[in-house]
């Protein structure tokens, strides 16, 4: 991007060295030359990829491709027996320095791979790659597989713990709802009980009414003494009972007494009649 935007209407060519040159002067590559060619060909800032570029840019190569400027970082690049392979280009005034981007370099990528080698090896073993394909020894293979099993067990334990926490939370919520409903039902039950059996409850009133009815049935009211007698006229007062109903008649001591008794009975019979 920096090289493309250095000049307006610039045409950017990117030279890519072959695997043989790179392995000889720099080291083993992760991506082969075909993959590196394709990666650069799909970069939006690159207009053309020069394959099998030389390690050191010669005047003949620059003339052949009509190169006006060479873009690279300004740090001296020592290689192929030279302290700086871009020295003659700098002296010719054809060098344009660019700035390095932190974290993006071949060395940084390789460092990350080496640092996390065990993780990548274990992951690829788990995906089905063989120890021979990964260049892993027999002992390391067993170690990595054992570590994978341990990680699986940890993951299962973690999942069980999470599910247990969810279950406990649901139980707590359910218990809270049940307790709340139980309290509401208890208050309702106590209220209904007091309303029925309390000091002024319906049960007491009903009991008092039934008790009053039972007492009234067991102890009826007496008839009034001044009520009129059947068959008698209300204008006449009842006559006192005759003396003969309450005592035996004694033999008259004299003829006069006997005649008086007969006379009183006669008068009473006449009154009754």
Image (cartoon, rainbow, N blue to C red):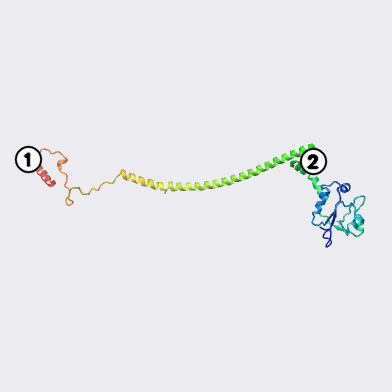
Mark 1 or 2 closer to N-term?
Answer: 2
Q: Are marks 1 and 2 in contact (CB under 8 Å)?
A: no
For the N terminus, the quadrant is bottom right
| Inter-mark Cα distance, 1 to 2 | 168 Å
Q: Residue at x 34, y 46 (%)?
A: 213
Q: Secondary structure at mark 1?
A: helix
- Judging depth in this view, the residue of 154 and 240 nearest the camera is 154
Residue identifier under label 1: 255
Q: Residue furthest left?
A: 255
Residue identifier under label 2: 133
Q: Residue at x 80, y 46 (%)?
A: 113
- Judging depth in this view, the residue of 257 and 146 nearest the camera is 146
Q: Is residue 62 left or right of residue 161?
A: right
Q: Residue at x 79, y 41 (%)?
A: 133
Q: Secondary structure at mark 2?
A: helix
Residue 103 shows up from this direction: no
In the figure, 108 relative to 137: above or below? below
Callout 2 environment at 10 Å: few (<14), some (14 to 19), or many (20+)?
few
| Residue 208 position within the rendered picture, expressed as x and y whole percent measured from the top left | 37, 46
Callout 1 environment at 10 Å: few (<14), some (14 to 19), or many (20+)?
few
| Residue 167 position within the rendered picture, expressed as x and y whole percent measured from the top left | 61, 44
Q: Residue furthest bottom?
A: 8
| Residue 124 position within the rendered picture, expressed as x and y whole percent measured from the top left | 76, 42
Can you tell which quarter of the image residue 254 is in?
top left
Q: Is residue 241 left or right of residue 120?
A: left
- Judging depth in this view, the residue of 261 and 14 nearest the camera is 14
- Judging depth in this view, the residue of 264 and 47 nearest the camera is 47
Q: Which mark is residue 121?
A: none
Q: Residue furthest front?
A: 64
Residue 215 shows up from this direction: yes
Q: Residue at x 69, y 42 (%)?
A: 155
């Amino acid at each position: 991007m920096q090289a493309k935007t250095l000049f307006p209407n610039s045409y950017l060519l990117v030279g890519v060295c072959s695997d043989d040159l790179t392995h000889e002067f720099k080291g083993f590559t992760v991506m082969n030359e075909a993959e590196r060619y394709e990666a650069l060909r799909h970069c939006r800032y690159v207009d053309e990829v020069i394959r099998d570029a030389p390690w050191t840019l010669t005047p003949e190569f620059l003339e052949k491709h009509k190169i006006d400027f060479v873009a690279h970082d300004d740090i001296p690049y020592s290689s192929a027996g030279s302290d700086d392979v871009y020295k003659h280009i700098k002296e010719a005034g054809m060098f344009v320095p660019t700035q390095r981007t932190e974290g993006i370099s071949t060395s940084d990528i390789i460092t990350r791979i080496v640092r996390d080698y065990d993780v990548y090896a274990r992951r690829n073993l788990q995906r089905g790659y063989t120890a021979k394909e990964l260049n892993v020894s027999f002992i390391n293979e067993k170690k990595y597989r054992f570590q994978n099993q341990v990680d699986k067990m940890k993951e299962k334990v973690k999942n069980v713990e999470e599910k247990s926490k969810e279950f406990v939370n649901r139980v707590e919520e359910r218990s809270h709802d049940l307790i709340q409903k139980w309290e509401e039902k208890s208050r309702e039950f106590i209220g209904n009980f007091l309303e029925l059996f309390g000091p002024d409850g319906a049960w007491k009133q009903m009991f008092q009414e039934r008790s009053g009815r039972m007492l009234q049935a067991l102890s009826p009211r007496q008839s009034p003494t001044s009520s009129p007698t059947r068959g008698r006229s209300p204008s006449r007062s009842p006559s006192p009972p005759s003396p003969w109903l309450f005592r035996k008649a004694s033999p008259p001591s004299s003829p006069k007494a006997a005649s008086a008794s007969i006379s009183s009975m006669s008068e009473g019979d006449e009154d009754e009649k």
